[in-house]
């Protein structure tokens, strides 16, 4: 079995190494992917269309908004599946585990976490809101936000974290994120545009169509951030406790 | 060996990045096929995934280009700010479409966007796979592939042999594994009910196949799940003892 | 030249760390080494100019996926057979 696997891998490796020679040279500015009209259009006219300096955010939330919306839905469904697969929990007792966790929270750790969790959360908001002009956006900000809740669960215990962010409201928040995303799309549809055509939001926002796209992108990123925050936290909560939602890591 | 045009030069010097991606991809693929532990397989899957993401990102790299965020001279908001503060100095009003020469100064943002979402979806699917691992561990008490296959085979043979055994034993040649499971079933029937090793799932599947066996075990469901790891060991010991006995 | 050297260094370290994370038998060590792999990957992407991808990898790959892996190993057997 192992030999067959090694042989298979070797053959595939040989084929891929031969294929590598056909690639354009490293960093070639005239590589087919770089001179394609789509990519050139994104680089050239993102500033005119949306006034967003960070092209990645603009392409993510505006030009390819439909794609991102369903990626968010995929994250949501994955979280839902994890929680429902592990639901109920096993009957194995904690002492059957190889790790024994002292459930008494440590003084130094909890006080340090008390200090840094607000900083992490503010940084998450900054990353989310500042994604237009610097690296960042809904996904990164959402994950940082979820990590702050995971940190609470790690330093105290899961019960403390679940008091602050119960699992039931996790899915409400996650669904709310997708509703915000799709709602902005539907709103622009109701105002006469197409789905996720944010420029038409300028009819209700006191800004130009370009700035309407700018601000709608922020709304969309907030929706993504909600979903990702809740799902990352739900993932940790169910995986660390094997679905029992108590005495976790 | 490394002169111009040779295959080593092409692979290891000019296209070293691509070559390393191939190596990473192969490591991931090999781990997915040949590793025994399910968690190791998933780590292999993640390595495979990062190799592909690396490949995607690196086809958008341009030599001497900057990151895909507008420099201050092309920044739409930068121009606005300058316009408001001092209109006479900067005649340009508002952002403009960049020329082709300027486009080449920015890295291609499209692969970044595609891969950014792929990473986040990747961790969501990794979580899903890990939850399936936990579920397998809950049902079989192991996350190793060979032990898992062994247990699955045992279970299959038990399910397959039981209805046949009731009709006639001699019609089919009894294989070793079958005899083991049969003797074990008999042994467990002789003993008192709570020690009878039947997991939740197995009982469900075998309900139709063997109506003779009493169903009173369902009362002791929780107890049995607790006993699972020790039971697995006992089963293995018993089977080895039986096979030794058969040989002698 | 310096950048090229850094690139080569990171790439070779990537292969070493990937093999190491599959080679060690302790699954917690494996998960942590996989976190190192993600950080190296993040460095490589920052060097390629994909800052958003690097940021995502730093938060998602090195942060959450390591935590999730360790949380899972906590509920499994810690030692792997290979």
Image: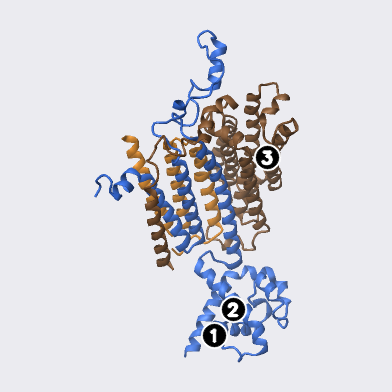
Chain colours: A brown, B blue, C orange
- Measure how far apart labels 2 and 1 are at the Cα level: 10 Å
Which residue is under mark 1? B175
Relative horizontal placement of residue A61, taking residue C42 as reference (left or right): right
Residue contact at pointers 2 and 3, CB within 8 angstroms: no
Q: Around disc 3, counting alpha carbons within 10 Å, would you say few (fewer than 14), some (14 to 19), or many (20 or more)?
A: many
Residue C50 in the image: x percent, y percent? 47, 36
Q: Against A58, is A161 above or below?
A: below
Q: CA distance from mark 2 to mark 3?
A: 49 Å
Displayed quadrant of residue B58: top left
Q: Which residue is the extreme one toward the right?
A: A190
Q: Nearer the viewer, residue A105 or B220?
A: B220
Q: In the rendered image, which residue does mark 3 sit on?
A: A177
The image shows residue A32, relative to residue B226, as above or below, that is: above
Q: Secondary structure at mark 1?
A: loop
> Residue B173 at x, y = what percent?
56, 88
Q: Check disc 2 and report the residue beneath it.
A: B157
Residue A50: tell me if it is visible. no
Q: CA distance from mark 1 to mark 3?
A: 58 Å
Nearest the viewer among A133 and A97 is A133
Chain at tag 3 = A
Secondary element at image label 2: helix
Find out whether the residues at labels 2 and 1 contact each other: C-beta distance under 8 Å.
yes
Secondary element at image label 3: helix
Dot 2 or dot 1: first in sequence order is 2
Is the residue at mark 2 from the same chain as the one at mark 3?
no
Residue plotted at (71% across, 40% down): A179
Residue B123 rendering spot, x and y as whole percentages: 55, 48
């Amino acid at each position: 079995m192992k030999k067959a696997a090694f042989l298979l891998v070797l053959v595939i490796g040989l084929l891929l190494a031969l294929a590598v020679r056909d690639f354009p040279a490293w960093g070639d500015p005239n590589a087919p992917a770089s001179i394609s009209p789509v990519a050139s259009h994104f680089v050239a006219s993102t500033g005119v269309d949306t006034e967003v300096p960070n092209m990645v955010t603009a392409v993510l939330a505006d030009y390819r908004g439909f794609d991102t919306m369903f990626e968010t839905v995929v994250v949501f469904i994955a979280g839902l599946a994890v929680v429902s697969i592990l639901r109920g929990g096993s009957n194995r007792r904690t002492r059957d585990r190889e790790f024994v966790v002292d459930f008494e929270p440590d003084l130094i750790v909890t006080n340090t976490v008390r200090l840094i969790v607000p900083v992490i959360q503010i940084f998450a908001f900054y990353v989310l809101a500042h994604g237009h002009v610097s690296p960042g956006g809904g996904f990164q900000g959402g994950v940082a936000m979820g990590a702050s809740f995971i940190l609470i669960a790690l330093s105290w215990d899961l019960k403390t974290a679940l008091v602050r962010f119960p699992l039931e409201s996790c899915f409400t928040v996650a669904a709310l994120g997708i509703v915000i995303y799709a709602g902005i799309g539907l709103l622009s549809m109701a105002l006469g545009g197409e789905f996720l055509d944010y420029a038409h939001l300028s009819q209700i926002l006191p800004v130009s169509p370009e700035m309407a796209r700018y601000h709608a992108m922020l709304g969309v990123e907030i929706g993504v951030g909600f979903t990702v925050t809740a799902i990352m936290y739900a993932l940790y909560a169910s995986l660390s406790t094997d679905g029992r939602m108590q005495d976790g890591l | 060996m490394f002169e111009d045009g040779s295959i080593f030069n092409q692979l290891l010097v000019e296209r070293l990045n691509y070559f390393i991606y191939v190596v990473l991809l192969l490591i991931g693929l090999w781990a997915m096929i040949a590793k025994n532990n399910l968690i190791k397989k998933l780590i292999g899957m993640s390595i495979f995934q990062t190799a592909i993401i690396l490949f995607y990102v690196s086809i958008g790299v341009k030599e001497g280009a900057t990151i895909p965020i507008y420099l201050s001279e092309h920044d739409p908001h930068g121009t606005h700010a300058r316009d408001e503060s001092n209109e006479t100095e900067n005649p340009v009003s508002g952002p403009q479409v960049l020329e082709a020469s300027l486009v080449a100064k920015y890295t291609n943002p499209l692969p970044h966007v595609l891969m950014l979402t792929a990473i986040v979806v990747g961790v969501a699917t990794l979580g899903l796979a890990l939850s399936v691992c936990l579920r397998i561990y809950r049902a079989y008490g192991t996350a190793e592939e060979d032990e898992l296959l062994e247990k699955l085979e045992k279970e299959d043979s038990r399910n397959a042999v039981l209805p046949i055994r009731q009709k006639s034993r001699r019609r089919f040649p009894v294989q070793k594994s079958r005899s083991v499971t049969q003797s074990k079933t008999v042994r467990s029937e002789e003993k008192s009910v709570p020690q009878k090793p039947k997991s939740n799932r197995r009982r469900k599947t075998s309900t139709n196949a063997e109506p003779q066996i009493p169903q009173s075990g369902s009362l002791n469901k929780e107890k049995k799940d607790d006993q699972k790891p020790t039971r697995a060991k006992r089963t293995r010991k018993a089977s080895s003892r039986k096979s030794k006995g058969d040989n002698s | 030249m310096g950048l090229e050297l850094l690139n080569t260094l990171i790439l070779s370290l990537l292969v070493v760390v990937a093999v190491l994370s599959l080679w060690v038998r302790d699954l917690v060590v494996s998960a942590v080494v996989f976190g190192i792999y993600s950080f190296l990957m993040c460095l490589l992407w920052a060097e390629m100019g994909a800052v958003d991808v690097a940021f995502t990898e730093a938060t998602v790959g090195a942060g959450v996926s390591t935590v999730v892996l360790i949380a899972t190993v906590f509920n499994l057997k810690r030692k792997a057979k290979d």
